[in-house]
C-alpha cells in the first residue's frame, strides 16, 4: 500500500528520497512522486504514474537530482480514490502552491469538505481525497490567522478516516509536520537530520534511533529541533526514542534475484530464531505473555483473528491449541470479526496474527476485542508496529523484515509461535504430560532437515515449469495440512495469477471435482499419518477423472508412485514439522511457476504488502 518517506536536514534530499522510495516499492504501488522545498523557498513537485524508476528518469531529465538541499517528501501511491495516474499521484499542493503534502490512508468525509471548499472558490486538480486535506490546510493557513502548525491541526481535527501525512509549507520553510491517525509513521533521528517513513525500511540505512508516532500524534520539526504533540492540542508529549535492531541486510537481495526467493531460503534460520531461547528443559518461556499468563490460561474461549496468510497460520494454530490444550478456538477473518456478533467477552483471549502489524482490519479487530474486555495477544513480526502496541501482550516472530509481497518466512514463524503457545497452554492446564511436551519441543532434527527440503529446489522447479501454463489448480490436504493447502493455493494465485483453490481433500467431492479434467493439476499433501488411506481414496477419485496428480509426501510407498504424475518427497519427521516442509515446497512451487511466466514475483499486480485500509 502507499508508502511515505520524508527528509529534513542539510543534505541533498533527492538521493535520500529516491532510495527511500525504492525501499518502499515492496509495499505495492502504481505511481510515485516527490516534492522538495529548496533553501530558496521554491517547491518542486515531480510525479509519474508507473514505477519509481520512471520518476527517477523524469528527475534526471530535468537535472533535478543534484539539486536540493532542504526538505523533501515523497510517496508511492496505491490508488483508492481516483485512477492511478500522474495527476492523482502524491504529493498534492493546495491552490496557493504554498503547501504540499503526502498522505497514506483514506479521508472518509472528503466529499462534504470538498463541497465546502468549492463554495470558497477552491479549485481541485485531482480526484483524490488527499487533495481535499491539503486544500483544507491551505484554506486555514491562507486566511492568515493561523500559523502552519495550527492550520494543520485545525484541518486534521475536521477530517474523519485514517491518515499518515507529512506536510511542507514554503512560507515556513524550516518546518516539517507529520501526523498519524490509523496509518503508521516512524520518525528517525540522526543529529540534525530527520527521516520520516511509513515504515522503517526507508530509514534504517540512515539511523537506528526511532520514534514510532502513536495514534493521533503529530511531530513538528522546526530547524534542528522537534516536538511531539497530540493532534487535539499543542501540548508537548514525551519523546520515546527506541533503538531498532533490524539489519540493513534485510533490505538487500544478496545473491537472489527476488526477495521472495531469499526469504524462502531464510527459513532455515528464521524458524530457528523464532523458537530459540523460548524453551528450557521442557518449559516454554514466552516473556511477552508473562504478565497476562494467569488470565490467559484460565480463558474459556480463544479467538484467532488475522488476514491473508496470517489467517492460514491461525487455522493451524486452532488445530494445535485444540489438539494439545483442549480449549475450543474460533478463527475468524479480521474483516469479519470486526463487524460480526462474535461472542467475545472479558473471559476471552483474542490472538491477532499479523506479519506487518499494520493491517487495518486486524487492528480494528483488536480494538473490538479490547473494547469487549478480552485479553489481546499479538503475534507479530514488527516491533513497535500498531499490533504490538495495541494488544495487551504478545510474541514476536523473529524473521527480520519480510519484503516479498507474498508472505513466506513470516508464515512458518507464526506457526512456530502457535506451536509453542499451544504447548505452553497444554502444560498450564495439564492437558498433556511433561514428558510428551518435552518430546514435542525436541526440534533439533526437524530444523536440520529444512535444508534438505530447500535442496529439492531444482526438482521442484522442473515440476513447476511443467505446469506453468495450467489455468486452474486444486490444492488438497487434511487436518493440519488443509490450511497448508489454502496457503499453497494463495501463494500461486498471488504471484502467478493462476486460479487456485485449497480444500480439505475429502471436501473436493462436494463441488470442486466438477472442475477436474485432463488439464487440471491437483496438488495433494499426503503425510503418512492416520488420514493417509483416506487421502489415497481422494486421489483415486481425481485420477479416475484424468486430473493430473502432484503429491507432496514423506512416504515412499509404491501406491503413491503409481498414482502420481509428479512426486516430491520431503524428509521423514513428525507431522507438525511436515506442515512446514510441505509449505516450503509449495512456496518454491509457486515461485518457479511465476518465474517461469516471467512475472515480477516480489511485486505482484494489484497486491500490497501491508494493507492499511479497510
Ligand atoms: C496482505 C499481504 C499478505 C498478508 C496479508 C496480511 O494481503 O499481501 O501477504 O498475508 O496482507 O498481512 P499481515 O501483515 O497482517 O500478516
Image (spheres, helix red, strand yellow):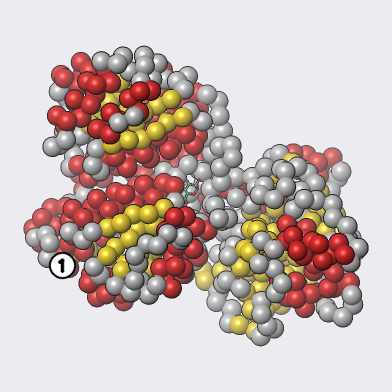
The location of residue 466, given as percent across then percent down, is 41, 17
Q: Is residue 489 above or below residue 329?
A: above
Quarter of the image for residue 62 reads: top right
Q: Is residue 340 visible?
A: yes
* Residue 248 horizontal side relative to residue 19, left or right: left
Name the one closer to the observer, 401 or 85. Answer: 85
The location of residue 194, given as percent across then percent down, is 68, 67
Q: Residue at x 21, y 55 (%)?
A: 322
The location of residue 607, given as percent across then percent down, is 56, 42
Q: Residue at x 50, y 43 (%)?
A: 404
Q: Is residue 539 above or below residue 331?
A: above
The location of residue 557, given as percent across then percent down, is 15, 23
Total labels drawn: 1
**Residue carrying label 1:** 429
Q: Secondary structure at mark 1?
A: loop
* Residue 158 horizontal side relative to residue 40, left or right: left
Quarter placement of the C terminus:
bottom right
Amino acid at each position: 500500500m502507499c508508502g511515505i518517506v520524508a527528509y529534513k536536514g542539510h543534505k541533498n534530499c533527492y538521493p535520500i528520497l529516491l532510495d527511500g522510495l525504492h525501499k518502499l516499492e515492496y509495499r505495492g504501488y502504481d505511481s510515485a512522486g516527490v516534492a522538495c522545498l529548496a533553501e530558496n523557498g521554491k517547491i518542486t513537485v515531480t510525479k509519474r504514474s508507473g514505477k519509481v524508476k520512471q520518476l527517477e528518469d523524469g528527475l534526471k531529465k530535468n537535472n533535478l537530482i543534484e539539486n536540493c538541499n532542504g526538505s523533501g517528501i515523497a510517496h508511492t501511491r496505491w490508488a483508492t480514490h481516483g485512477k492511478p495516474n500522474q495527476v492523482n499521484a502524491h504529493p498534492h499542493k493546495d491552490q496557493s502552491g504554498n503547501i504540499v503534502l503526502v498522505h497514506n490512508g483514506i479521508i472518509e468525509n472528503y466529499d462534504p469538505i470538498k463541497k465546502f471548499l468549492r463554495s470558497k472558490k477552491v479549485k481541485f486538480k485531482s480526484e483524490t481525497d488527499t487533495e481535499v486535506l491539503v486544500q483544507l490546510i491551505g484554506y486555514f493557513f491562507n486566511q492568515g490567522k493561523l500559523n502552519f502548525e495550527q492550520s494543520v491541526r485545525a484541518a486534521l481535527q475536521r477530517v474523519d478516516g485514517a491518515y499518515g501525512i507529512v506536510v511542507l509549507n514554503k512560507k515556513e520553510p524550516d518546518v516539517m509536520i507529520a501526523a498519524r491517525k490509523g496509518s503508521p509513521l516512524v520518525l528517525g533521528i540522526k543529529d540534525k537530520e530527520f527521516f520520516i517513513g511509513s515504515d522503517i525500511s526507508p530509514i534504517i540505512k540512515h539511523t537506528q534511533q526511532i520514534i514510532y508516532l502513536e495514534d493521533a500524534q503529530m511531530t513538528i520539526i522546526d530547524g534542528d529541533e522537534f516536538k511531539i504533540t497530540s493532534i487535539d492540542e499543542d501540548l508537548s508529549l514525551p519523546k520515546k526514542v527506541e533503538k531498532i535492531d533490524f539489519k540493513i541486510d534485510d533490505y538487500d537481495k544478496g545473491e537472489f534475484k527476488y526477495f521472495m526467493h531469499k526469504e524462502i531460503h531464510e527459513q532455515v534460520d528464521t524458524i530457528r530464531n523464532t523458537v530459540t531461547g523460548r524453551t528450557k528443559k521442557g518449559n516454554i518461556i514466552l516473556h511477552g505473555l508473562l504478565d497476562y499468563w494467569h488470565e490467559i490460561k484460565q480463558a474459556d474461549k480463544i479467538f484467532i483473528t488475522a488476514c491473508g496468510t496470517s489467517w492460514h497460520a491461525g487455522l493451524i494454530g486452532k488445530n494445535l491449541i485444540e489438539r494439545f490444550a483442549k480449549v475450543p478456538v474460533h478463527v475468524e477473518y479480521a474483516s469479519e470479526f470486526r463487524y460480526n456478533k462474535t461472542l467475545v467477552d472479558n473471559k476471552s483471549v483474542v490472538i491477532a496474527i499479523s506479519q506487518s502489524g499494520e493491517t487495518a482490519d486486524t487492528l480494528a479487530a483488536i480494538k473490538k476485542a479490547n473494547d469487549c474486555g478480552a485479553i489481546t495477544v499479538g503475534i507479530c513480526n514488527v516491533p513497535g508496529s500498531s499490533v504490538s502496541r495495541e494488544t495487551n501482550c504478545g510474541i514476536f516472530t523473529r524473521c527480520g523484515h519480510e519484503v516479498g509481497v507474498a508472505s513466506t518466512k513470516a508464515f512458518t514463524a507464526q506457526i512456530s509461535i502457535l506451536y509453542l503457545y499451544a504447548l505452553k497452554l497444554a502444560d498450564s492446564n495439564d492437558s498433556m504430560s511433561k514428558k510428551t511436551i518435552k518430546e514435542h519441543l525436541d526440534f533439533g532434527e526437524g530444523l536440520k532437515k529444512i535444508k534438505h527440503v530447500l535442496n529439492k529446489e531444482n526438482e521442484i522447479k522442473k515440476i513447476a515449469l511443467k505446469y506453468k501454463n495450467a489455468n486452474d489448480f486444486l490444492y488438497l490436504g487434511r487436518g493440519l495440512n488443509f490450511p497448508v493447502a489454502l496457503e499453497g493455493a494463495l501463494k500461486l494465485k498471488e504471484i502467478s495469477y493462476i486460479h487456485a483453490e485449497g480444500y480439505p481433500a475429502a471436501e473436493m467431492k462436494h463441488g470442486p471435482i466438477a472442475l477436474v479434467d485432463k488439464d487440471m493439476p491437483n496438488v495433494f499433501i499426503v503425510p503418512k499419518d492416520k488420514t493417509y488411506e483416506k487421502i489415497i481414496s481422494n486421489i483415486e477419485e481425481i485420477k479416475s477423472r484424468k486430473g493430473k496428480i502432484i503429491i507432496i509426501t514423506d512416504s515412499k510407498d509404491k501406491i503413491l508412485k503409481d498414482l502420481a504424475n509428479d512426486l516430491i518427497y520431503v524428509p521423514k519427521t513428525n507431522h507438525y514439522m511436515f506442515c512446514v516442509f510441505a509449505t516450503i515446497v509449495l512456496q518454491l512451487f509457486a515461485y518457479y511457476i511465476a518465474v517461469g511466466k516471467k512475472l515480477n514475483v516480489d511485486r505482484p499486480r494489484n497486491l500490497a504488502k501491508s494493507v492499511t485500509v479497510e
